[in-house]
Image (spheres, grey):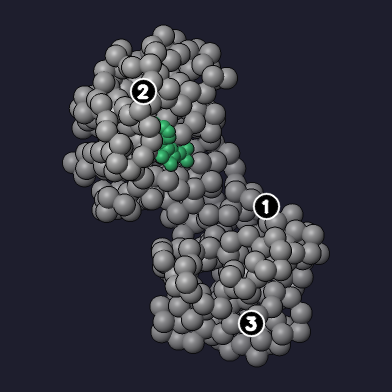
Amino acid sequence: MKKTIRDYDLKDKKVLIRVDFNVPIENNHITDDTRIRESLPTILYAIEHQAKVILLSHLGRVEKKEDKQKNSLELVAEYLSKQLNQHVLFVDATTGPLVEEAIASLNNAQVLLLQNTRYEDLDGKKESHNDPLLGKYWASLGDLFINDAFGTSHRAHASNVGIASYLPSGIGFLIEKELNAFESILNQPERPFTVILGGAKVKDKIEVIENLVSKADQILIGGGMAYTFLKASGLSVGKSLVDEEHLSYCRDLMEKYPDKIILPIDSVNALEIGEYVPTKERFVSDFGDDEIGLDIGYNTVKLFSQYLKESKTILWNGPVGMFELEPFCQGTKSICQLLYENDGMKIAGGGDTAAAIAKFQCEDAFNHISTGGGASLELLEGKKLPGIEIINEK
Ligand code: AMP
């Protein structure tokens, strides 16, 4: 078990907290503040326990000088001030005297946000390549390190692994919540345990399938990847997305787990991809040569609903259709609605899945929606996340 922020006495301590403030910004306006809101419990806890709070985060990519201004965290400091009801200090630097002076004059319960950690990428990718001197320098600014940036914990950067290598460390409440959710379903799922797997390509999900196929009672396959499975089972899928290199992988998997891999029985097809194109609903044995499969059909939703109704644990990764476009969103929307009717444990992970759930406003149907796309995928693959592995054990 990893130490958490609760395991430390924070009073009078300079506590470095790595948060994930990588929020979308358009015209100087934060368009989705989920990540900021998710970081509040840890920051508030540190304030209440009289820490001197120093926040570090990245925002976007900083590859050239011109990227600096649009990826400044100053706007986030202003936004956070309103959320916390107290002025959040901001220093427009990541290292050096400005940073050190600001930290030296911090009082207990005050919050300071440093400039975007990726400003350090301009000079030899020091942040993203976990430059040991940079990690050591940041560690020298505090007494304790708390990692609460789940979304970047699958990467070893100077602002997570680097700092944690030199300071006592713990995880914050967001990472704790994410780990508890995934561990509960991966280690001891209540059965039946059903996985809904969608998304574009088989190749991106192979390791997830490998890790989950023995744990789950069934895997319902939708999205672009379903057409590779359908083709592997001998059907013609017209011009649908097919991952030719993985046809034999899919065939072997279906032979090995015939009762576990559940494929669509019908599909919403079109001759082209677009917002206003006509569609045809076809049984999978009935594809036209020019058709592209872009969503699961009505009968597949009914088939999947039989499994979902019975399930005590459900994990969803990947939309089952091209949900961004109106003609192909119904399958994903129906899955969201079906999940409302199930009162088991339901977890969703992956950036696009979270975006689909937000689009259809179905957040309430879930016990947990992961905030980390890549990080949640790696947990589902059974991998250890370096930003969490490095944290001290209890
Ligand atoms: P992933 O990031 O792998 O979860 O993939 C998500 C993407 O898969 C979304 O942008 C969907 O539009 C896309 N997708 C879902 N179904 C299909 C499909 N039948 N054909 C092509 N792309 C799809």
Mark 1 crowd level (few <14, some 14–19, many ≥20, 10 Å Cα)? some
Find residue 127 and report its horizontal and vertical position in percent.
Answer: 71, 61
Residue type at mark 2: give it.
Glu
Find residue 217 and report its horizontal and vertical position in percent.
Answer: 35, 25
Q: Is residue 15 visible?
A: no
Sequence order check: which comes first, mark 3 or mark 2? 3
Q: Nearest the camera: 378 or 139? A: 378
- Image quarter where the C terminus lies is bottom right
Residue depth check, mark 3 versus mark 2: number of the one nearer the observer:
2
Q: Nearest the camera: 272 or 295? A: 272
Identify residue for label 1.
156
Identify residue for label 3.
91
Identify residue for label 2.
291
Sequence order check: which comes first, mark 1 or mark 3? 3
For residue 275, what is the image quadrant?
top left
Sequence order check: which comes first, mark 2 or mark 1? 1
Find residue 279 and report its horizontal and vertical position in percent.
Answer: 27, 30
Q: In the figure, is residue 129 to the left or right of 216?
A: right
Q: Nearest the camera: 91 or 180? A: 91
Q: Secondary structure at mark 2?
A: loop
Q: Is residue 17 visible?
A: yes
Q: In the figure, is residue 67 to the left or right of 357?
A: right
For residue 160, what is the image quadrant?
bottom right
